[in-house]
């Protein structure tokens, strides 16, 4: 892997959908860099500090959320002199997003008073009153033809189906939720999944005409659903719960066909490979070196010198690090907080928040545990390569960690005092964005085919 030099950032960073550009927020400025050369190709000045960035699907436009102002500014890469400013006045703006056609912007006002569709082609705008959430509760079909927008009125949740061509409401139906959490179209655009707040375990599947196709409730008492995700092929729906279990439903009968428990002790028989991160001090012959006390003191702030890490393969049985959440505090750190499918839908990775240093990788073809990664520090982010079966994760250290079906690897980031707090893939899987608190860098990742068994080492 090859790494760029660090660049400054003070907020969101986002790859364009065509994987040609990288947008970076630096205080009031929006910096657009070329992904190949990392040279600045455009620089836009906003009216306040940038809180949010989102590219249009055609990569020609980009919007910036200035939520402290509050307002939205949009820019064009093809026409740098073109500009757009959206201000809702006293209603404020809590969130903004692009429509699939890249020519409309949807904004949600403060206190969820209304959702407004703004056209970049003319001055027309359309209002949808009482949206349920600011950043959630809106989902588009994969072909961009329709939008499902959740609203609430008279203490009841509704789903509004809206055409993305005319922006007319095609249908409205009530849903059987106490406090709707979110909505998502199926990948084949034939069904809509809706789930309730954590206080009520309820997952509902609706058809486009408002018929409830299935209602799933794993249990009644206790906190319920924490995360929901469709598989990319649309054949499976994964539901992560506060009871520390992953349940997977099929798309034909909407019945559970797999239940995976996140146990604190792993025993045989189990075919999963268990990888544990361990320190690996570098063996250097320093007998002929003379280091003064001043040099040692000046460099002590860089942490322990000559320390690398590697994965050791552990034998069963093994006890995993577990943190019991306090019973007297809200929002307990337990349940499936991270859940992500591989691009071929064969694997799904999960993190049980009461075991924050452990990542579980499940094989959905064999319906069994494929691997466990035990880190020294809590896992902050995990992302699948969009082109092949390769998983990358970070833990807030100077390393990134990779897993493929052929093994797991530790890669050192060769930048001083750089801690990987977050990471993102570009859309073609060739570039990996690594974020620290105030800087970022990118790594050129070698392409890996699904049947490849490329070898990595800690110093790649």
Image: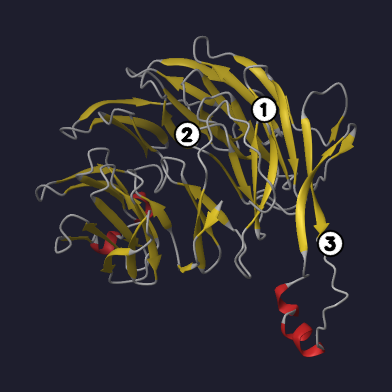
Lateral position of residue 285 relative to residue 156, left or right? right
| Residue pointed to by mark 1 | 362
Q: Quadrant of residue 390?
A: top right
Lateral position of residue 301 relative to residue 383, left or right? right
SS category of the residue bearing label 3: loop
Marks 2 and 1: in contact by CB < 8 Å?
no
SS category of the residue bearing label 2: loop
What number of labels is visible? 3
Residue 6: percent from left, percent from top: 50, 67
**Would you place residue 266 above or below residue 306 in this image?**
above
Residue at image position (15%, 49%) is 120
Marks 3 and 1: in contact by CB < 8 Å?
no
How far apart are the two marked residues, 1 and 2, measured between alpha carbons? 19 Å
| Residue pointed to by mark 3 | 283
Residue at image position (59%, 58%) is 421
Q: Earlier in the sequence, mark 1 or mark 3?
A: 3
Q: Quadrant of residue 261?
A: top right
* Residue 102, visible in the rendered structure: yes
How far apart are the two marked residues, 1 and 3, measured between alpha carbons? 36 Å
| Residue pointed to by mark 2 | 387
Front residue (pair 91, 235): 235
Residue 335: percent from left, percent from top: 68, 39
| Circle 1 Cα neighbour tier, 10 Å, few/some/many (<14 / 14–19 / ≥20) | many
Q: Earlier in the sequence, mark 1 or mark 2?
A: 1
Residue 108: percent from left, percent from top: 32, 50
Residue 211: percent from left, percent from top: 39, 15
Front residue (pair 19, 358): 19
* Residue 325, visible in the rendered structure: no
SS category of the residue bearing label 1: strand
């Amino acid at each position: 892997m090859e790494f760029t030099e660090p660049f400054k950032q003070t907020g969101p960073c986002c790859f364009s959908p065509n994987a040609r550009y990288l947008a970076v927020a630096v205080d009031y400025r929006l910096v657009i860099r070329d992904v190949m050369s990392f040279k600045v190709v455009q620089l836009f000045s906003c009216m306040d500090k940038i809180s949010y960035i989102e590219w249009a699907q055609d990569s020609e436009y980009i919007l910036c959320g200035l939520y402290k102002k509050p307002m939205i500014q949009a820019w064009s890469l093809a026409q740098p002199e073109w500009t757009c400013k959206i201000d809702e006045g006293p209603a404020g703006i809590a969130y903004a997003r692009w429509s699939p056609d890249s020519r409309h912007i949807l904004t949600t006002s403060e206190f969820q008073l209304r959702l407004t569709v703004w056209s970049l082609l003319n001055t027309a705008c359309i209002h949808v009153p009482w949206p349920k959430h600011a950043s959630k509760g809106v989902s588009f079909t994969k072909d961009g033809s329709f939008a499902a927008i959740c609203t609430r009125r008279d203490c009841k949740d509704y789903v509004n189906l809206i055409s993305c061509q005319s922006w007319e409401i095609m249908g409205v139906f009530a849903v059987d939720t106490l406090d709707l959490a979110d909505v998502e179209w199926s990948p084949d655009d034939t069904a809509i999944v809706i789930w309730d707040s954590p206080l009520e375990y309820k997952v509902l599947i609706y058809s486009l005409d408002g018929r409830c196709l299935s209602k799933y409730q794993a249990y009644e008492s206790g906190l319920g659903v924490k995360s929901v995700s469709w598989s990319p092929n649309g054949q499976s729906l994964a539901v992560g719960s506060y009871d520390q279990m992953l349940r997977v439903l099929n798309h034909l009968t909407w019945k559970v066909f797999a239940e995976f428990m996140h146990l604190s002790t792993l025993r045989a028989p189990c075919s999963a490979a268990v990888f544990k991160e361990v320190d690996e001090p570098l063996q250097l012959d320093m007998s002929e070196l003379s280091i003064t006390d001043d040099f040692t003191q000046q460099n002590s702030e860089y942490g322990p010198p000559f320390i690398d890490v590697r994965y050791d393969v552990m034998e069963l049985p093994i006890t995993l690090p577990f943190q019991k959440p306090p019973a007297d505090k809200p929002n307990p750190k337990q349940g499936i907080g991270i859940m992500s499918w591989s691009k071929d839908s064969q694997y799904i990775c999960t993190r049980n928040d009461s075991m924050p240093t452990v990542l579980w990788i499940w094989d959905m073809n064999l319906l069994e545990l494929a691997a466990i990664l035990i880190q020294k520090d809590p896992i902050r982010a995990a992302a699948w390569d969009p082109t092949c079966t390769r998983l990358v994760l970070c833990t807030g250290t100077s390393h990134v960690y990779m897993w493929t079906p052929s093994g797991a690897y530790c890669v050192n980031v060769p930048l001083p005092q750089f801690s990987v707090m977050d990471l993102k893939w570009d859309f073609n899987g060739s570039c990996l964005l690594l974020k620290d608190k105030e800087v970022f860098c990118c790594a050129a990742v070698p392409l890996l085919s699904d049947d490849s068994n490329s070898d990595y080492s800690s110093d790649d």
